[in-house]
Amino acid sequence: MARYFFDSGDRDTVLKDEVGIECDGIENARREAMQGLIDLTREALEDLNGQQLFIEIRDEHGEKLARFSLSLHTQLRDQEASDLR
């Protein structure tokens, strides 16, 4: 099993994972990253408008293996109507 590190953040902040998780291959690490991004999104959902959340996977040597990101933009119906005027 290899240790993978899951750095996370948004446009303003990056949190480096200093502990990591042992996973049985990159596919398991990918699943962990996707679940982490889902959890991160739940926590930040109210303040997410216009932001981008991400999780990057690093290996034990610090090499970036993958990046998963999510951005959300909301537009209220009233805003749509005023934008058209």
Image: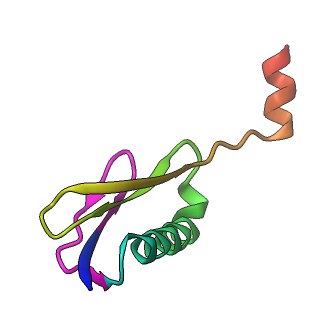
Magenta residue span? 6-22
Locate residue 15 relative to residue 72 in the image: left or right: left
Of 53 and 64, the residue lying toward us: 64
Q: Is residue 42 above or below residue 81?
A: below
The C terminus, quarter of image: top right
Residue found 59% across the figure and 47% down from its top? 49
1 over 4 or under it: above or below: below
Its colouring scheme is rainbow
Quarter holding residue 25: bottom left
Residue reaching furthest to the left: 61
Residue 67 is situated, as x and y percent measured from the top left of the image, at 40, 53
Magenta stretch contains residue 61:
no
Percent across and percent down for residue 34 are 51, 68
Q: Tell me if residue 18 is in the magenta stretch.
A: yes
Q: Nearer the viewer, residue 48 or 60?
A: 60
Q: Name the spot of residue 47 as percent of width and height, x first.
A: 54, 56
Q: Is residue 25 left or right of residue 76?
A: left
Q: Residue at x 27, y 73 (%)?
A: 4
- The residue positioned 55% from the left and 53% from the top of the image is 48
Image check: 57 left or right of 63? right
